[in-house]
Image: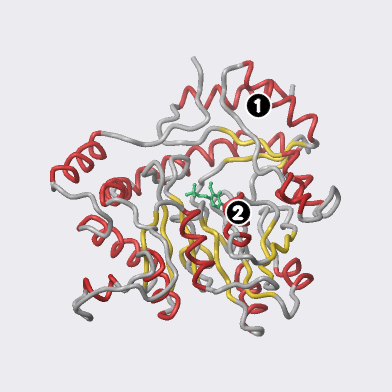
Amino acid sequence: MKIPFHVPVYDDTDAAALAQSIASGSLVGDGPATRRVTAALARDLGVRHALLTPSCTHALELAMMTLDLEPGDDVIVPSFTFVSSTNAILRRGARVVFADVDPATLTLTADEVRARITPRTRAIMPVVYAGVSPDIDPIRALAASRSIVVIEDAAQGIAARYRGRPAGTTGHMGCFSFHETKNFSTGEGGAFVTNDDAFIQRAEIMREKGTNRKQFMLGLVDKYTWVDVGSSFLPPDSMAALLESQMAKRERIQARRQAIFERYSDAFAPLARDGRLALPVIPPYAASNHHIYHVLMQDEPTRNRALAFFREREIGTTFHYLPLHLSPMGRALGHAEGDFPVTESASGRLLRLPIYPSLTEAEQERVIGAMKEFFP
Ligand SMILES: Cc1ncc(COP(=O)(O)O)c(C=O)c1O
């Protein structure tokens, strides 16, 4: 029997939440479920402001819109990330300044940022990888001394922590994903968070087609009108209803993921000791949300053989992030092989294994057994 690479957690309580949302007679954005889940999210994350968005991609675009970036502005971002991070920058006409990552956590480092900061740097976009936050404090310190804005791409960061604080909340703005591949899924979905009153005021207007509708809803103005450039970044209220139901399962989902993660790491520890592979690293400053389980093989041919080996055994595994600087877009931006060696090496060696709550003990055994068989 095939072991899928990913299976989302949808159950009867989710179906009931969606049915109830439809029965309410209205699914437009910012309805009652959106208000409830947004308040809960802000409380859980300890932030002053949160907005639901149709995806993390939209949240990143919204964050970039609030900055009024101009051609000539630079944004520093790791090459080891998803295309949404860099699209959000390019769509504002700003320049993507790629950086390399830490070989252990595969996240942006202060040293990499320091080497790339110039007077043109307007923003830095650290990315949470696999549920492990970058070491943000030194990055923030570099940014603060130069009035640079830090936007965290925490698409993979919900329920993770950095030095006790929720990941995604330690910069000026943070963006989360509830895509079906994430720990909590609404199919597509996202959130934008900030503690900054000026950023939220602009984001609320831009999210509502450039109007002051939010102020109208609060009774602060008697008519709403066009006040700024904007778009429509509101998800339907049904997405919020599903998110509420998903978050209610938080303890169970997180506990299952952690158990599988630890089981894999225990089982593969001897292979790591023998230098056959490297286990995922969670530094002391971080608490992971165990979003991804990945190992790093010795080299790319070995990783590719492992992908084929698991495929033959009907076990879903995959690679992660082809370096953006080597994509056709990255090359068009002037990059070439060798520009970011850690990213290139990790991308070639990385193998992701199935990790989700419904993965049974027997299935975990099969994954572990296959890995041991691969390294006889
Ligand atoms: C780092 C990163 N940023 C952004 C995204 C985009 O998220 P969404 O699918 O919610 O737009 C992803 C998706 O996996 C991601 O890994």
Q: Mark 1 — residue?
A: 371
> Which image quadrant is residue 111 in?
bottom right
- Going by the numbered disc 1, the residue's amino acid type is Met
Q: Residue at x 62, y 40 (%)?
A: 294
Q: Mark 2 — residue?
A: 282
Q: Position of residue 124 (x, y in %)?
A: 63, 69
Badge number at residue 81: none
Q: Is residue 11 above or below residue 249?
A: above
Q: Position of residue 259 (x, y in %)?
A: 47, 40
Contact flag, marks 1 and 2 (Cβ < 8 Å)? no
Q: Nearer the viewer, residue 68 or 266?
A: 68
Q: Is residue 134 left or right of residue 116?
A: left
Q: Position of residue 179 (x, y in %)?
A: 44, 45
Residue furthest to the front in view is: 226
Q: Residue at x 50, y 53 (%)?
A: 57
Labels 1 and 2: the sequence-earlier one: 2
Q: Secondary structure at mark 1?
A: helix
Quadrant where the image shows the C terminus? top right
